[in-house]
Image (cartoon, rainbow, N blue to C red):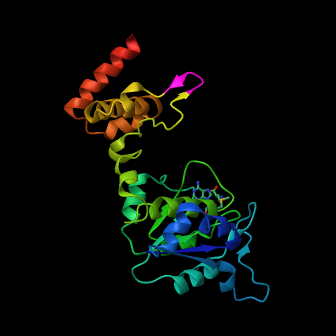
């Protein structure tokens, strides 16, 4: 896979590209992440990339001609072109999965007050990372590419991806590691029992419980199995108890 990020602030990506799991996935050759400076596509001698909005208003807008030139030079016919924007549906794990199937992705980072609206017709989709306004699309592009890249085959262990939050519209169950006893707070005994059926039952129940507690909205789209309906009953009885 190739991801090209168009930005006015390439140095923001140094830590992202050279640290931890993303670095490992890049070193394995599973993804190439190119950072392109949009300013290189400005033709005027002062390398202007932004201008004041027509009709007045605060701040500066990124210029459509510069963005278009940067995009044309760094995309291919089969590129999936994303524009970071708060004016879009929030990015989800299902979007990360969908996008991980593309071989070439271009992500455009806005900055300042945003971009000239006329550029939007050159992108395939706008992506927001949440209902808040960032100073620029750089962090958003890192979030989006991080979520995509970790899903690539051989990126991280298959097991780690097997049961994760949002798969099947559930949150992941709580997990524990050593020490067994932390100031009297002990790891649930069932997890040490070695009984895989009991452990699965417990983890499934806890996943449902976490989802009910923190993201009950996810359950609206969850296909409940018979076992899960029974687990819900157990959880309800515990809450009532
Ligand atoms: N004036 C714009 C508005 O009110 O909708 C906000 C522009 S924002 C300050 C500058 C750039 O940051 C945007 O063009 C976009 O690229 C990026 N950005 C801001 N919030 C974002 C979000 N929640 N998700 C993705 N990108 C975002």
Tell me which segment is drawn in magenta. 182-186
Say if residue 106 shows up in the picture: no
Residue at the spot x=45%, y=62% of the render?
148
In the picture shown, does residue 1 fall above or below 41? above
In the picture shown, does residue 11 fall above or below 58? below
Position of residue 132 measured from the top left corner of the image (x, y, whole percent): 61, 49
Position of residue 69 measured from the top left corner of the image (x, y, whole percent): 59, 84
Give whichever of 236, 107 is nearer the camera: 236
Position of residue 56 measured from the top left corner of the image (x, y, whole percent): 74, 64
Residue at the spot x=75%, y=80% of the render?
48
Position of residue 219 measured from the top left corner of the image (x, y, whole percent): 35, 36
Q: Quadrant of the C terminus?
A: top left
In the picture shown, does residue 225 fall above or below 230? below
Name the residue furthest right.
46
Q: Quadrant of the N terminus?
A: bottom left
| Quarter assignment of residue 49 | bottom right
Give whichever of 176, 64 is nearer the camera: 176
Type of secondary structure dominating the magenta stretch: strand
In the picture shown, does residue 209 fall above or below 60? above
């Amino acid at each position: 896979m190739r991801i090209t990020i168009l930005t006015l602030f390439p140095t923001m990506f140094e830590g992202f590209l050279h640290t931890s799991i993303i670095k490992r996935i890049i070193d394995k050759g599973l993804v190439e992440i190119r950072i392109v400076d949009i300013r290189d596509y400005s033709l005027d001698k002062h390398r202007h990339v932004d201008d004041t909005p027509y009709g007045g208003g605060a701040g500066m807008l990124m210029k459509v001609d510069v963005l278009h030139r940067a995009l044309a030079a760094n995309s291919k016919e089969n590129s999936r072109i994303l524009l970071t924007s708060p004016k879009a549906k929030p990015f989800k794990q299902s979007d990360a999965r969908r996008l991980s199937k593309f071989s070439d992705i271009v992500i455009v980072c806005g900055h300042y007050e945003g971009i000239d609206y006329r550029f939007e017709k050159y992108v395939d989709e706008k992506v927001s990372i949440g209902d808040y306004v960032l100073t620029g699309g750089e962090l958003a592009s890192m979030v989006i590419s991080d979520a995509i890249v970790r899903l690539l085959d051989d990126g991280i262990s298959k097991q780690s991806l097997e049961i994760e939050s949002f798969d099947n519209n559930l949150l992941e169950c709580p997990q524990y590691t050593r020490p067994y006893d932390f100031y009297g707070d002990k790891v649930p005994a069932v997890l040490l029992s070695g009984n895989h059926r009991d452990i699965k039952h417990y983890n499934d129940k806890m996943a449902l419980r976490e989802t009910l507690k923190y993201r009950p909205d996810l359950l609206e789209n969850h296909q409940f199995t018979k076992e899960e309906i029974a687990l819900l009953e157990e959880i309800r009885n515990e809450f009532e108890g």
